[in-house]
Amino acid sequence: MKKYICIDIGGTAIKHGVADEGLRLLEKSEIPTKSQVDGGPGIVKKVLKLVENWRRCYDISGVAISTAGMVEPKEGRIIYSCELIPGYTGTELKKIVEAASGLPCAVENDVNCAGLAESVTGAGKGASSCLCLTVGTGVGGCLILNGEIYHGFSNSACEAGYLSVGGESLQEKAAASVLVRKIADLRGISEDQLDGKQIFSEAQKGAADCVQAIDEMVEALSLGIANMVYILNPEVVVLGGGIMTQREYLEKRLQAALSEKIIPAVYRNTRLAFAQNGNDAGMVGALLNLLKEEKSR
């Protein structure tokens, strides 16, 4: 079986590994992104080094990349990256990797990759339309229609984090980083002293500030989801990202909030599901994207 290098570039970590064409990850690891320190040029150097290192261990047929930021997928170019990765906008990542390695490379947005993985092997498998939302440091979204990523006219479809919710963007209301910041501010402590898991743990024990902050996050997230459901009418909405590992706490609350915002005729025909591919979703989706490109050549 052919083997491929899979790389998932996030704001805090770069996950990487080798997988075969059956989507089996043979090895995987991760390194810190250090995006604020190294910026886009530093990420490029790390990616090229990872490709070089994996090629010493395996006979590699291609490089599949999932990355934060808006991506022009045909050219594999970063068309926009927020302040999380300075100096990344405009990076010709596909061209750089192919020139350095001589291998075919495909580059796609990380949420699009995660959504593609969920639609093929995860919670959205078998659905004709799958809206995937990831909630982590920020909020991202993608739409998979009949197994294909819907990019929109200028490759910016489903940028859910920029939705306006109550006068602010959805990611300013519902991202995990906002949840941590809110509790830290209320308690007068550093954000470094808290994380999402601790906040949910305390909420389950009845900590009023944590319960209220999560309720506010659920309210904002449900409003964003409801608006997207009315416009897109997806068969399934798949929720992923670090914070969605708290399914036991969130699922009933999200369902209740959505049932209040979506009319019954639409609500009963919209399935809510939680992502199944975990931290491997970006790499699996990146490989699926590369394999699709190979078939279309």
Image (cartoon, grey):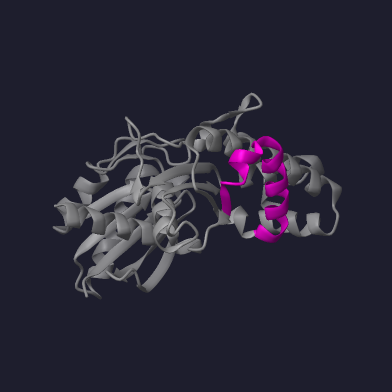
Q: Which residue lies furthest to the front in this view?
A: 265
**What stretch of residues is rendered in magenta?**
246-272
Q: In which quarter of the image is residue 263?
A: top right
Image check: 250 left or right of 57? right
* Nearer to the camera, 175 or 16: 175
Residue at 61% over, 60% down: 245
Residue 233 seen in the figure:
yes
Q: In which quarter of the image is residue 204?
A: bottom right
Q: Is residue 109 magenta?
A: no
Residue 72, x across and y down, in percent: 29, 38
Count of numbered marks: 0
Residue at 60% over, 37% down: 226
Residue 181 seen in the figure:
no
Q: Quadrant of residue 92?
A: top left
Residue at 85% over, 48% down: 208
Residue 128, x across and y down, in percent: 41, 50
Magenta span main SS: helix
Residue 179, x across and y down, in percent: 68, 44
Please say if 23 is above or below 144: below
Residue 196, x across and y down, in percent: 67, 54
* Nearer to the camera, 297 or 203: 297
Please say if 263 is above or below 101: above
Residue at 15% over, 51% down: 99
Q: Quadrant of the N terminus?
A: bottom left
Image check: 6 left or right of 253? left
Q: Residue furthest top?
A: 167
* Nearer to the camera, 162 or 97: 162
* Nearer to the camera, 57 or 295: 295
Please say if 221 is above or below 28: above
Please say if 264 is above or below 193: above
